Each structure stands twice: as C-alpha cells, then as structure tokens.
Amino acid sequence: VPKKLMSYGAHFADWLRLASNYGWELGAARHDFAKLLRNRNDEIARLNGIYIGMLEKAGVRLIAGRARIVGRSGDGFVVEVGGERIAATRVALAVGAQPSAPVIPGVELAVSSDQLLEDVYELPRRLAVIGAGYIGLEQSSIFLGLGVETHLLLRRQLPLHGFDDDLRHGLKTALERRGMNFRCEMEIQAIERTEGALRVVTSTGAVEVDQVLLATGRRPMPNTRGIGLEELGVRMDDAGAVLVDRDYASNVPGLHALGDCSDHAFGCEGGTAAEELGLGSGEFDLTPVAVAEGRALAERLFNDPTARVNYHAIPTAVFSIPQAASVGLAEARARRLGHDVQVFMTTFRPLLYTMPDDGGARGEDRTTMKLVVDRETDKVLGCHMVGDDAAEIVQALAVALTCGATKAQFDDTMALHPTSAEEFVTLYQPVA
Ligand SMILES: Cc1cc2nc3c(=O)[nH]c(=O)nc-3n(C[C@H](O)[C@H](O)[C@H](O)COP(=O)(O)OP(=O)(O)OC[C@H]3O[C@@H](n4cnc5c(N)ncnc54)[C@H](O)[C@@H]3O)c2cc1C
C-alpha cells in the first residue's frame, strides 16, 4: 500500500503534463515531497489502526514484542514474548521475510525498500537502484516520476526475471522512453563514499549518485533464525524458509508456517502447484497468498479440513509507471512445461494519449497485451500486459483463468468499447 500511494504521487507528473492536451491550463506545478511522505505515513498508520481494531474486535489478544519458542510444554510449545510465557498446543509462524543484501564493500551505505517506504527523507537528486525485480522497478519508477535522475542496475539484459519476455521488453522500452538509465549485464562490486555523493562501482563502470537503494531480493532469514526453530529441529531450506506440507505443517507436529517465511507447501509430497507451474517458492511471496494460507490453515484445523489454497492463477502486478501485470504462464515457461503454444499479441497507443500533443506529454506511450494459449485444449494459459491500469485489468482476467477459460470463450466475450481491456477479447490472429 505505501508504495502504491507513492506511485500515485509520481504518476501525477504525467497527468499534469497530459492535462494541457485536454484544454487545462494549470500554471507551473511544484511538488512537496515531504508532504507526500507525511500523508503516506498518516494513511498507513490509519490502516494499521483499522487492522488492529479488527483483531481486537474478533477477540484476539495482541502482545507486542519479538516472540521466541523457548521450550516444550507436553506435546505443545512455550512461547516467550513481551516478558510473558505462553503455553500453546499449536504455533503458526508468520514472521515474513527481510531484504537480502549482496556481500560487497560499502553495502551499509545503501538503503533498503523497507526504509524508503517507512522513513521521512529528502528527495535525492540522483538515485541508483540495484536489482530489477518488481520492487526495484516500482521504486525506480516512483523516483523517476518525481524528477530524480534514476539509474537501474541489473545483472541480466532485461528486468523482471521470471515474467513473460514480451512484457519485460515492453516495460524496459517504456521506461527507457521516460528517461530511466538502464545499466544491464553488470555485477555490483562496491559502493564508495565520495565527496558529497556515493559511487556505485560495477563490472562495467561506475555511476555517481546521492542515494543507493538495494532491491536484491528478500529471504525468510534472519526472521526464522534465533526464535527456537533450530533447537526444535525444524526443517528449512537454504534461504531459511520453513518446509511445510499441504496443511502448512512443518516436520515438528503442531508447528505450522505460512506466508513469506514458508515454502508455501511445495516441500510436500504428491505433486505440487510449484512443480506444475514451474515456479520457485519465492514467486508466491505476495500478500493475498499469505492471507489465503492463513485462512486455509484456520479452516483446515478448526472447520473444514478440505479447504485448500488455489495456487494456479495467481495474478501479480508491477506498480511501475507504466504498470505491468500477469496471470498464468509466461510463454517461455509454457513451452518448457511442454505446451504447444499459440501467442496472440497487440501493441497500440491508448486513446488517452491520442489527442494532439502540446509537447511534453507521453504521446509515444504504447500498451502491450499478450495471451498465451494451449493449441491442443484452446485453454488460455497466461495473460500479460504493460500499460495503464494493467493491474486492474489482469485482476479481472484472473477470474477467467481460474475458471479455465478457453480462447474461444475470450473471443465470445462481448467487448466493452472504447476501452483498452477490449483488446484482450478481440485478438483474433495468432502471431506465433
Ligand atoms: C516493497 C515491497 C512491496 C511489495 N508489494 C507487494 C504488492 O504490491 N502486492 C503483494 O501482494 N505483495 C507485495 N509485497 C509482498 C508482501 O508484502 C508479502 O508477501 C506479505 O507481506 C507476506 O505476508 P507475511 O504475513 O508472510 O509476512 P509480513 O507481512 O512480512 O509480516 C511478518 C510480520 O512478523 C513480524 N515478526 C517477524 N519476526 C517476529 C517475531 N519473532 N516475533 C513477532 N513478530 C515477528 C514482522 O515484524 C512482521 O510484522 C511487497 C513486499 C515489499 C517488501
């Protein structure tokens, strides 16, 4: 939520530029960055208050503090938190993940996304973002939109490893047009303090900036360390994710793990969503997945033992500017899983940008939409989009994919004109 609010804040720069094409005369615009941060923090505090209120209303007793399992109590556990010891038959771990940092000299000079989304700070003049996963792209887009000279440093040729290649290409092109400085296929070697600035040294040269953001992934370690799990013999993977079965149960009876700190039940036997989808457990680290797992665990233990999380059509968005969003399989992944794939794709200029341009507007922005279809069954395997409102549109398409929609059913769906989304139901000719 905090980054979405920041993204809205940055997006206004585009909307203000566009306004003159529609006859608005607004005068010189000025942005108050400190106000954006203050208002964002106030809104997050308000939301946190609502969640805490909901828990209290439901009868949950909240104890603030870092919890640790300090021993056994019969078949159960003794948990210590906030100076109290609590005996529990079952424990559900939901300790989340933490940003992971590369081991390089000067890494302490960089900040993490957690800091940028919680602290109040000055807008830097120049920013380097290391890592081009969704967090790196979102953060770099926000700062670019706010007028910061932004450098995105990545190991690969394209951002968003794991997403569909056409989406990756489309987003990179759009960001380059907006002035993002990509430095691809490099390794970070060091961060150095120079006079009044920071220098990021890479295998392909150095870049001088005022702030460096690390967006190099997240892992459950160290949250799952030092809280009594090793002493109990809980099985974890190399990143510290607790291995669980379909009941989110670890190898220690009564101890469950959910959300980012777990491997999302992929360590379990008997065929898994991860194997079928060819995904790694980190690709499931999303808020609605954690929420669904919490709900499923409560249902399975205390109400309906058949309750299951459906991992098959998890929509995911990158709140960059422009947005990118996907549900289902990327083309390359579908081919790797053995599908005979048909691809339908279009790239176009959305209506909003077609008005005669006074100059400075983003008239050249293009939207890309792509469907990956299984030729044999006609099932739509994946929907991918780069462009305005991609996240909203793909959320609705996730319903169709969850229902197992075919391309013929997409074609049968009446278009809603004039929208960008209608292109998804009027893609008649395959491109590959
Ligand atoms: C910058 C950023 C942007 C993101 N954007 C999106 C997005 O747009 N959409 C999306 O779906 N997901 C997004 N995510 C991912 C999402 O935040 C996580 O997948 C989700 O929060 C996981 O929920 P969780 O409950 O497993 O862990 P968390 O939400 O991390 O919660 C874990 C909690 O446990 C607490 N804790 C840890 N150890 C202990 C302990 N020993 N005792 C007591 N408390 C403890 C932590 O302080 C934390 O409050 C984003 C993540 C980041 C970092």
Image (spheres, rainbow, N blue to C red):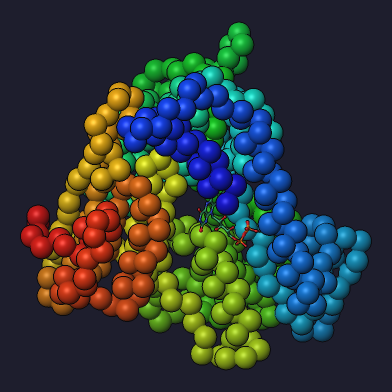
Q: Residue furthest right?
A: 83
Identify the residue shown where x is 16% and y is 62%. Answer: 426
How many numbered marks are there? 0
Identify the residue shown where x is 62% and y is 41%. Answer: 117
Left or right placement of residue 385 versus residue 147 in this view: left
Q: Quadrant of residue 32?
A: top right
Left or right placement of residue 271 versus residue 70 in this view: left
Q: Is residue 275 visible?
A: no
Quarter of the image with the C terminus in it: bottom left
Q: Residue 379, position in %: x, y? A: 21, 74
The one of 180 and 50 positioned closer to us in this rendering: 50
Q: Residue furthest top?
A: 195
Identify the residue shown where x is 59% and y is 25%. Answer: 123
The one of 154 and 23 positioned closer to us in this rendering: 23
Ligand 1, image quadrant it occupies: bottom right
Q: Residue 282, position in %: x, y? A: 47, 57
Q: Residue 387, position in %: x, y? A: 32, 47
Q: Relative to 413, does residue 18 appear above or below in the rendering?
A: above
Q: Residue 171, position in %: x, y? A: 31, 41
Identify the residue shown where x is 36% and y is 32%. Answer: 23
Q: Quadrant of residue 321?
A: top left
Q: Is residue 321 visible?
A: yes
